[in-house]
Amino acid sequence: MHFRGLLFLIAMAVPAAPSAEGRIPDKALCSVCALKGGETELEKVRARSEHDGKAYFFCSRNCKKEFDADPIAFLPSVFPRPAPAFVVETFEGADRTVADLKGKVALLDFWATWCNPCLETMPRLQRLYSTYSGKGFDVWGVSIDEDKDRFDRIRKVVYELGISYPVFVDAKPMPAWYRFKVKAIPAMFLLDRDNQIVAQWTGKINFEDVEKEVSLRLDKTTEARVE
């Protein structure tokens, strides 16, 4: 299972409105390009699909084919929803699973050493971790690097950026990025203490929004314990 072919572009899922009587408009936003490339301009419609009673339009038959193969991955996210079962690996070869995050508010960050936007986000993740780690918050950095030299490159990035939050390798036959239906990186998923996904971000990430969501989830947990 390889991720290299997936671009680390800004993601934006915007489903098209249903077309009356199945008609195809002249132009529309391509549902696949919007997610993988941050496309916001209307394009010439060359294909159409339906899913769950709604119509989606595409700039090419290849985009339609990709959508039809996994439509859920291109639809607006639903919150909360259970985090999928997954396994990641430490540098020492030990396995870690979603069960290890039970009871914590956790932010999963899918990244790669070849993804510059990913590297730019990591110092901000470190500051977030330093601020909230003592309050039941954790960050897991999940590298999707694949080649045999990945461990050395990942360690170098961790050292140079001064990262102290846990960093793992997504090295299993059924990788975590596939389980989470990641189509672009950086991609972040916020889990509550019950392992429910309560927020997610892809591409150009607003860290004020991320910190707000983290603080909100930690506050909700505190309120629940007081009650």
Image (cartoon, helix red, strand yellow):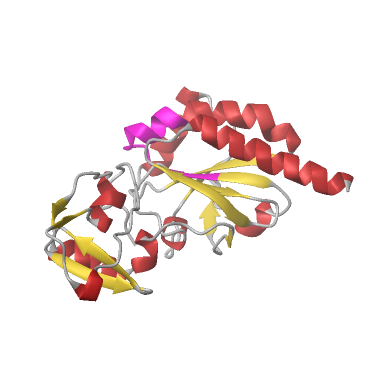
Q: Position of residue 116 (x, y in %)?
A: 33, 32
Q: Residue furthest right?
A: 227
Whether residue 188 can be seen here: no
Whether residue 141 can be seen here: yes
- Viewer-proximal residue, 72 or 101? 72
Specify the quadrant of the image occupied by residue 212.
Answer: top right
Q: Position of residue 83 (x, y in %)?
A: 57, 60
Residue segment shown in magenta: 108-121
Whether residue 187 is situated above or below residue 83 in the rendered picture: above
- Name the residue at 55% across, 57% down: 79
- Name the residue at 45% across, 52% down: 170
- Drawn side of residue 225 relative to residue 6, left or right: right
- Drawn side of residue 178 relative to residue 32, left or right: right
Residue 26 belongs to magenta span: no
- Viewer-proximal residue, 7 or 142? 7
Whether residue 95 is situated above or below residue 167 in the rendered picture: below
Q: Position of residue 173 (x, y in %)?
A: 42, 64
Whether residue 60 is situated above or below residue 90 in the rendered picture: below
Residue 111 belongs to magenta span: yes
